[in-house]
Image (tube, helix red, strand yellow):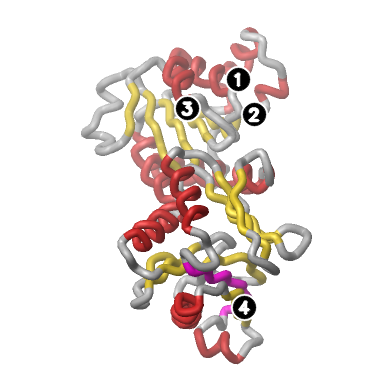
Amino acid sequence: MAETQYTKLALDWHRAGRKVAIATVVETWGSAPRPVGSLLVIDGDGAMEGSVSGGCVEGAVIVEALEALEDGNPRLLEYGVSDDEAFAVGLACGGRIRILVEPVGGAMPVSILEELVAAAEAKQPIAYVVDLENDMRRTTDASEFVNRFRSDKSGIEDDGRTFVGIHNPPLRMIIVGAVHIAQHLVPMAHACGYAPTIIDPRGAFGSEDRFPGEIILDDWPDEALAALKPDARTAVVTLTHDPKLDDPAIIATLKSDAFYLGCLGSTRTHAKRVTRLEEAGFDAAAIARIHAPVGLNIGGKSPAEIAVSIMAQVTDVLRRA
């Protein structure tokens, strides 16, 4: 479940009359097991969904959350390997974490939670901003904290007191070519938080039987991409190995803000592709955006191994941006 889904769960529980608190990882050091921005939702009976430490400190956080639900006040908790309490709750992995606990309807206004949920449902980016030293809480759009939105990086600003929780819509992966590699890549994309779309006008390839439950478009790739409008949170992978299908997709992607474009094919195949793109008017800087041969060079041979290399490269490009 994505973090944005936990905000919806918290709102659903609140609307159902349950007392609800949200715990958020606001800072980590060392080998803390969950990233900043991770959420844990707790109700008044101690029921919980999500995770702030992979099981290390959840028990202690729940106790604090239940107390917060009684007085309506937030808690800013810190656990670290040097603390006796940290050993007691199981955080003996060498890391430290700070966790903000906020009762819904108390420290966290219901109106803000509703804004977060509405943005998620509209697939719009939104940030939850908290001054950890007072009661200031607000939301903002992607025009503020641009780098944090681009890299999905929640965290505390340089002032040491302003926490910015990034709530982005899902990343997208557009796969051109419903080939064998795609059958392995699609579930990996799901697992890594991407919403995949498959494009292939060849009915025998892009069938429901081969990709059950997936979004499959049988339009010509350039037409499909024009409708999908790849943005800075979109990766595009071309796998058909057929210039008639791949080239229109590549050209459309190079004209977009997609953060990743990877193309299947050997070095020789890519050299011919570069020539065609140069003839189409693309300069060296634009062509350099293409990752080809696609994927990290891990020596993969089978379709599954190639899919692993592609997913690894997409992740590497995203996180290094």
From the top left corner, tell me how far across and down residue 240 is, in percent.
Answer: 42, 24
Marks 2 and 4, how far apart at CA: 42 Å
Q: Which residue is mark 1?
A: 255
Q: From the viewer's perspective, is the residue at label 4 or at label 1 nearer?
A: 4
Magenta residues, dominant SS class: strand
Foreground mark, 1 or 3?
A: 1
Q: Earlier in the sequence, mark 1 or mark 3?
A: 3
Spot occupied by residue 296 in the image (x, y as percentages of width and height): 57, 43
Write down the region rendered in magenta: 93-103
Q: If you read the primary sequence from the N terminus, does the residue marked by circle 1 or circle 2 appear first?
A: 1
Which mark sits nearer the N-terminus, 2 or 3?
Answer: 3
Residue 226 at x, y percent in the picture: 48, 18
Q: How many numbered callouts?
A: 4
Circle 1 packing at 10 Å, graded few (<14), some (14-19), many (20+), is few
Residue under the image location 49 percent in, 63 percent down: 39
Tag on residue 78? 4
Q: CA distance from mark 1 to mark 2?
A: 11 Å
Marks 4/1 in contact by CB < 8 Å: the verdict is no
Q: CA distance from mark 2 to mark 3?
A: 14 Å
